[in-house]
Amino acid sequence: MGYWASFIALDLEKIEANKIVREMKDKLKKYNNIISWHNPNYLHLTLNYFDWLEETQIGIIEKLLTEVQNKIPDKILIKDEIICIGGNENKYVALEIDKKNLIPLKKDMDTLLIKHRIDYKIQEFRPHISLGRIKKGSLIKLKNIEQAIGVKGISLYESKEYSISIMSRCKQYNKK
């Protein structure tokens, strides 16, 4: 058995995530007709994305997650702007995250994945929290939203049916 569209992500504190989504919905209310908001219970910050994982690789990754637990930051800082990301068909409205306190965790995770020969999609590390999908051709800008959000732990997920809102947690590792 294998896992399609799997990813390692930081889990966010649920109460804080719900608060941020409520605030963003209010600040972006003039765009609500073009935004399909994600469920705040599924907000996360993706660190590594895998096209496909074999069953044997899951155990290795779970071991690696325990090795990086001590690098999980207590808080992540949201930059002062909303970004729109994605391809031609679907775009996402997202909060851009300051990556300074995430770099040690990301570097260690990348090093361990390479050491254990686990392929992952190598791309520019542009940390963000996706809030929802927006219709094609829309562009949203919002400034002065700087704040922090708590991090609960790190998990391995499998995205099902290409929808971020339908995720099954493989295992979560809380901060040490």
Image: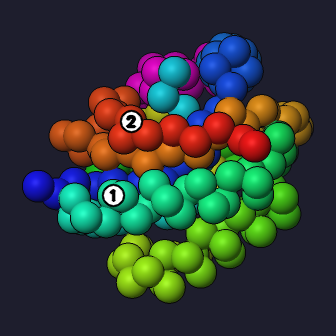
Q: Amino acid at mark 1?
A: Ile
Q: Which mark is residue 58?
A: 1
Residue visible at 32% across and 34% down in the picture: 168
Viewer can see residue 46: no
Q: Label 1's element? A: helix
Numbered label tally: 2
Give yes or no for residue 61 being in the magenta stretch: no
42 in relation to 125, above or below: above
The label nearer to you, 2 versus 1, is: 1
Q: Is residue 96 left or right of residue 6?
A: right
Picture quarter containing residue 147? top right
Front-lying residue, 63 or 162: 63
Viewer can see residue 116: yes
Q: Is residue 122 left or right of residue 12?
A: left
Labels 2 and 1: the sequence-earlier one:
1
Q: Amino acid at mark 2?
A: Arg
Q: Is residue 139 left or right of residue 137?
A: right
> Horizontal and vertical percent for residue 9?
53, 49
Quadrant for the C terminus, please: top right
Q: Which mark is residue 169?
A: 2
> Horizontal and vertical percent for residue 173?
58, 42
> Horizontal and vertical percent for residue 140?
61, 41
> Horizontal and vertical percent for residue 51?
28, 66
Quadrant for the N terminus, please: bottom left
Give the farthest residue toward the left. 1
> Distance from label 2 to label 1 (Cα)?
12 Å
Front-lying residue, 81 or 119: 119
Residue visible at 54% across and 32% down in the picture: 43
Q: Label 2's element? A: strand
